[in-house]
Image: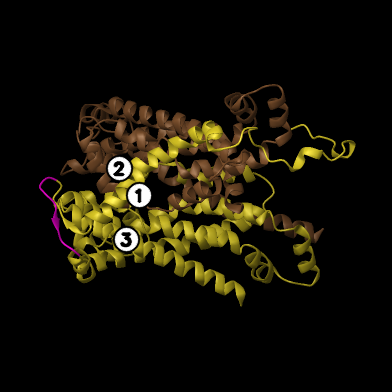
Chain colours: A brown, B yellow
C-alpha cells in the first residue's frame, strides 16, 4: 500500500515537471496572442499585461495597411504548395528507382546524392543569385520554386521507406499483369508509401513556408515578397516599431503552419524518431 | 499490410534474379534514368555549377557588375588575417555552445521523463514539438519583445524578484544569451522526441535486471541508458552542430532593429554577427562577391572541422 502511494506521488511529481515544460513550450505563443490584442503603449507598460486586451482588430487593420499581407501570404502559399507537389513527385519517383531497380551506375549515382546532401547552401548562394539574375528569375517566385523542386534528403528518406514497404512479390505480380514502369510506380508503389509521403510533404511545406535567407536575397521587389520577408520588413523598417501590429502579423503567419501541423502531427512525431534511429 | 504465410510456399526458384528489365544495355534502362534525372539536372544547374563557380569566384575580385579581376590567393590571405571573420567564428561558437549543451541536457531529461510517464504521452509530444513548427521570423520577433530592455518580460521578471535589469539586446553577452535561448526553446522538444524514440528501443529486461541488482535511477541512466543512446546522441550532436554553426535567421531578425547600420550587422559591437551573417554582409551589403565566396568556403571548412571534432569526441568517450 505504501509503495503504491509512493509511486503515485512520484507519478504526480513527474507530470508536474512535464506540465511546466509544456507551459514553457507554449508560452511564447500565448505571449504573442496577448501582445496582438494590445496597443504598443499598453505593451510597453509596467507591470506587463498578461491578459488579452480589446485592440486585436485595430492591430489587424494596421497590419493590412502596412504590408500586403494577403499578397505575400498568397506568394508563400504558392511557393510552398508548388515545391511540395514537385518534391513529392520527383523525390518519390527517383526513390522508387533507387529502391527497387538495378541499373548501371546506380550505386555511384546514389553515392553522389549522399555527398550532395552535405554541401551547405550558402556555398552556392552567390552564383545562384548571379545565374538567376542572368536568366531573369530574380524577383519572381520561380527563383524559389525551381531550385527546390527535388532534393537529396527526400530521395534518401523515401528510398529507405520504399525498401521496407514495397514487397518485390507485389511488383513481380504487377509486372506479370503487364504493368509498365509508370503503372508500377503509380498504382503499386505510391499507395503503399502514403505515410512516408505525408511526412515528407508536411516537412517540405513547413520548410518552404519558413524559408527566409534565400527569399530575402532573391526577391528584390519589396512589394512582391513572401510572408516571412514581409514580416521582417515590418519588424525592421520603422524607427519606433508598432509591436502590437508586428506581433499580430507574426501570429497570423503561424496559422497555416499550425493547421498543417495539426493535420499531420501523428505522422510527423511518429516518423521523426524512426528516421533518426535508422 | 497482408502477411503472406511463408511456410506454405516453397522457396521461389527465381528469387535470385534481380529486378531488371529483360533487355540488356544502358539504353534499355532509359525510363529509370529519366525518372532520376530531374534531381541531377537541378543539382547541376543550381548546385554543382554554382559551387564550382564560387570556388572560381573566390580567386577573383568582383562587385557583381563590372569585370572580374584575378586575385589569386589574396582573398584567402585576407580572410586568415580578418579580425571580423575570426570574431564571427567566436560569436557563432559561443552561441552554439550556449544553446546546444542546455538543449541536449534538457532534451535528454525530458525524454527520460516522457519514457516513464504512462499517461498523456502523445499530448506532451505534440506540445513539445510545437516550437519547432514555428517560423523563425515570427519567433524572433516574439523573443525580441521578451528580451526588450526597457519593457521586456524578462526584465519585468527580474524586477519582480528584486534584481537589476539587463540590457539584453545591447550587451555582447545579453545578445548571445537571447539568441541561444531562442534556439534552445525551438529545438529542445524536437531532440527530446528523437531521444524518446531511442529510449523506446532499449529492452525493458535490461532495466529489470538493473533494478534487481539494486541500481538506482541515476546509476541505471549512466550505466545502461546513456551507453545505448550513443548513436542517437551522436546524430543529435552532429545535426545541431551543422545547423547551429550556420545560424542566420535568428540573429538577423532578432538584432536588425537595434542598429542603424546594415541589416546583417548582428547588433551593437557586432556581438551577434555569426559567420553566415558576416557572409551576407560582405556579399550583399558591400557587393564584394569575390570575398564573400572566400568567406563561404571558410565557413564550410569551419563546419566540417567542427563536425569531425564533435564526432571524434563522442566516439572516443564511448570507447572508454
In the image, residue B158 lies at what x, y percent? 35, 60
As measured in the structure, the alpha-carbon distance from the residue carrying label 3 to the one carrying label 1 is: 11 Å
Q: Are marks 2 and 1 in contact (CB under 8 Å)?
A: yes
Q: Which residues are magenta?
A: B65-72
Q: Which mark is residue A214?
A: 2
Name the residue: 13% across, 50% down.
B63
Residue most extreme to the bottom: B320
Give the vertical position of B133 relative to B307 (above or below).
Answer: above
Residue A106 visible to an observer of this rendering: yes
Residue underneath mark 1: A121
Give the vertical position of A147 relative to B207 (above or below).
Answer: above
In the image, residue B86 lies at what x, y percent? 26, 68
Dot 2: chain letter: A
Name the foreground residue: A84 vs B135: A84
**Helix or strand or loop: what does disc 1 sit on?**
loop
Residue underneath mark 3: B299
Q: Are marks 2 and 1 on the same chain?
A: yes
Name the residue: 10% across, 47% down.
B66
Give the vertical position of A231 relative to B151 (above or below).
Answer: above
Amino acid at each position: 500500500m505504501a509503495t503504491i502511494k509512493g509511486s503515485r506521488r512520484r507519478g504526480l511529481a513527474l507530470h508536474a515537471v512535464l506540465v511546466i515544460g509544456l507551459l514553457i513550450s507554449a508560452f511564447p505563443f500565448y505571449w504573442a496572442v496577448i501582445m496582438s490584442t494590445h496597443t504598443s503603449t499598453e505593451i510597453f507598460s509596467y507591470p506587463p499585461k498578461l491578459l488579452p486586451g480589446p485592440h486585436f482588430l485595430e492591430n489587424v487593420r494596421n497590419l493590412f495597411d502596412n504590408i500586403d499581407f494577403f499578397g505575400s501570404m498568397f506568394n508563400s502559399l504558392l511557393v510552398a504548395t508548388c515545391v511540395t507537389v514537385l518534391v513529392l513527385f520527383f523525390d518519390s519517383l527517383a526513390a522508387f528507382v533507387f529502391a527497387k531497380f538495378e541499373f548501371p551506375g546506380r550505386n555511384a549515382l546514389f553515392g553522389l546524392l549522399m555527398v550532395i546532401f552535405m554541401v551547405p547552401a550558402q556555398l552556392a548562394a552567390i552564383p545562384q543569385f548571379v545565374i538567376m539574375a542572368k536568366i531573369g528569375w530574380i524577383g519572381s517566385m520561380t527563383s524559389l520554386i525551381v531550385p527546390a523542386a527535388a532534393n537529396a534528403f527526400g530521395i534518401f528518406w523515401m528510398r529507405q521507406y520504399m525498401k521496407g514497404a514495397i514487397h518485390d512479390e507485389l511488383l513481380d505480380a504487377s509486372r506479370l499483369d503487364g504493368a509498365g514502369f509508370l503503372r508500377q510506380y503509380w498504382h503499386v508503389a505510391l499507395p503503399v508509401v502514403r505515410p512516408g509521403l505525408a511526412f515528407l510533404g508536411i516537412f517540405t511545406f513547413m520548410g518552404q513556408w519558413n524559408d527566409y535567407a534565400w527569399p530575402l536575397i532573391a526577391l528584390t521587389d519589396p512589394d512582391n515578397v513572401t510572408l516571412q520577408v514581409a514580416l521582417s520588413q515590418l519588424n525592421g523598417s520603422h524607427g519606433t516599431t508598432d509591436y502590437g501590429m508586428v506581433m499580430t502579423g507574426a501570429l497570423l503567419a503561424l496559422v497555416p503552419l499550425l493547421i498543417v501541423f495539426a493535420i499531420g502531427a501523428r505522422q510527423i512525431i511518429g516518423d521523426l524518431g524512426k528516421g533518426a534511429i535508422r | 499490410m497482408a502477411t503472406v504465410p511463408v511456410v506454405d510456399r516453397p522457396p521461389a526458384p527465381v528469387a535470385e534474379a534481380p529486378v531488371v528489365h529483360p533487355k540488356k544495355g544502358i539504353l534499355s534502362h532509359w525510363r529509370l534514368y529519366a525518372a532520376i534525372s530531374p534531381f541531377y539536372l537541378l543539382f547541376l544547374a543550381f548546385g554543382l555549377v554554382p559551387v564550382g563557380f564560387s570556388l572560381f569566384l573566390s580567386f577573383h575580385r568582383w562587385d557583381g557588375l563590372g569585370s572580374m579581376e584575378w586575385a589569386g590567393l589574396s582573398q584567402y590571405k585576407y580572410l586568415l588575417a580578418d579580425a571580423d571573420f575570426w570574431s564571427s567564428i567566436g560569436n557563432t561558437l559561443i552561441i552554439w555552445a550556449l544553446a546546444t549543451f542546455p538543449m541536449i541536457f534538457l532534451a535528454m531529461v525530458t525524454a527520460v521523463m516522457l519514457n516513464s510517464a504512462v499517461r498523456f504521452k502523445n499530448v506532451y509530444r505534440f506540445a513539445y514539438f510545437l516550437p519547432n513548427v514555428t517560423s523563425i521570423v515570427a519567433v524572433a520577433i516574439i523573443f525580441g519583445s521578451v528580451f526588450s530592455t526597457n519593457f521586456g518580460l524578462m526584465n519585468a521578471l527580474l524586477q519582480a524578484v528584486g534584481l537589476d535589469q539587463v540590457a539584453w539586446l545591447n550587451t555582447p553577452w545579453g545578445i548571445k544569451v537571447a539568441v541561444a535561448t531562442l534556439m534552445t526553446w525551438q529545438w529542445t522538444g524536437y531532440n527530446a522526441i528523437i531521444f524518446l524514440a531511442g529510449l523506446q528501443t532499449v529492452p525493458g529486461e535490461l532495466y529489470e535486471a538493473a533494478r534487481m541488482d539494486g541500481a538506482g535511477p541515476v546509476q541505471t541512466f549512466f550505466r545502461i541508458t546513456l551507453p545505448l543512446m550513443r548513436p542517437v546522441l551522436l546524430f543529435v550532436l552532429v545535426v545541431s552542430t551543422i545547423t547551429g554553426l550556420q545560424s542566420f535567421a535568428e540573429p538577423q531578425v532578432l538584432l536588425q532593429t537595434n542598429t542603424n547600420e546594415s541589416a546583417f550587422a548582428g547588433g551593437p559591437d557586432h556581438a551577434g554577427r555569426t559567420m553566415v551573417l558576416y557572409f551576407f554582409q560582405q556579399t550583399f551589403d558591400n557587393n564584394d562577391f569575390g570575398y564573400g565566396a572566400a568567406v563561404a568556403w571558410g565557413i564550410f571548412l569551419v563546419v566540417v572541422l567542427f563536425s569531425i571534432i564533435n564526432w571524434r569526441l563522442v566516439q572516443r568517450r564511448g570507447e572508454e
